[in-house]
Image (cartoon, rainbow, N blue to C red):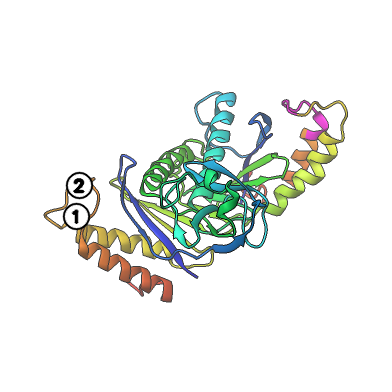
Amino acid sequence: MAIFSVYVVNKAGGLIYQCDNYVPRTEVEKTFSFPLDVVLKLHDEKVVVSFGQRDGIRVGHAVLAINGVDVSGRCTAEGKDILEYLQEPSHYPLAIRFGRARLTSNEKLMLASMFHSLFAIGSQLSPEVGSSGIEMLETDVFKLHCFQTLTGIKFIVLADPRQSGIDALLRKIYEIYSDFALKNPFYSLEMPIRCELFDQNLKSALEVAEKAGTFGPGS
Amino acid sequence: MTVHNLYIFDRNGTCLHYSEWNRKKQAGISKEEESKLMYGMLFSIRSFVSKMSPLDMKEGFLSFQTSRYKLHYYETPTGIRLVMNTDLSVPNCRDILHQIYSTVYVECVVRNPLCVLGETLQSELFTSRLDTFIRALPFFGVRAA
């Protein structure tokens, strides 16, 4: 069981804090000879597999490294276009590492504001009177829990579907936010949270929640 | 325990069918607008979830819940999407949505030569079978009165 990540979104939908607590490793490295038998394409400035799923390489995985050197976006470390580089027979044999592409900070900002709107639409489409927005979103590999405070700040936690005690954790994060961000005289409201004490306390709260699942009575 | 409403969309986003049972609140927009909004939300949730996921997913998005209702989602490989809103006490409805697809939709729509695929369903047989199916669910109607 695990807690994957935490997001804090302000009332305007801007991401003001994000931390990845646990990132599962899903990377496969394989040596290829010419011609390459997986079909690659360019998607969102990344080179991803579009066809030829095998040996743990899945459609949608991105090229992360070539010959052990990390690539950056659509270019190799030397700045050459990956798709062109892989078309050259003289470069083979070469080892390519595939895996789920990590989210860039821009993508995280975009996803946070996307959730902000989904939250609002979720409450608009309610068949019942007085519904809140999305509080829990379930998929087969993770659950997203969201807690919106009275002042409109959203705390979002991504966790394993079997992880318990997330509601208590969300309230604990709110408490940590009030104690270490709001009471910090150098913190300006609605702006990104850069407070060391907030980081530290959040980390320990996540550890406690992962191990025990609760904060004991009264918390 | 109750079922509020059910939407069926095809892969192009056309609302094939809509029916409601114990719905307390309307969205305040026309049915057409509402189904577009619903499809748009599901479309975005699908892409949101696939980007957000830390691992590779098999089924993808299953359901979400707010303080008052729960939305269950099921998508077939052909892109037919079934969406059912129930109250919070209803457990996982994936099997039920799959049953609706396999026993009602396939039987009455796909196998009916008079039904044009990709258009709003006119079949009365389908509507009545679906209604019977939903009303027979164990969690339907405790609050119906």
The answer to whether residue B79 shows anywhere in this view is yes
The mark found on residue A189 in the picture is: 2
Q: Is residue B125 magenta?
A: yes
Circle 2 SS class: loop
Answer with left or right where residue A208 lies relative to residue A122: left
Determine the chain carrying the residue at label 1.
A
B99 inside magenta stretch: no
Q: Magenta span covers which residues?
A: B118-126
Of all residues, the one furthest to the left in this rendering is A185
Q: Percent x, y for residue B127? A: 77, 33
Q: CA distance from mark 1 to mark 2?
A: 7 Å
- Where residue B15 sits, quadrant-wise, is top right
Q: Nearer the viewer, residue A148 or A189?
A: A189
Number of marks drawn: 2
**Nearer to us in this view, A59 or A210:** A59
Q: Is residue B145 visible?
A: no
**Amino acid beneath label 1:** Leu
Residue at (12, 53) in percent of width and height: A186
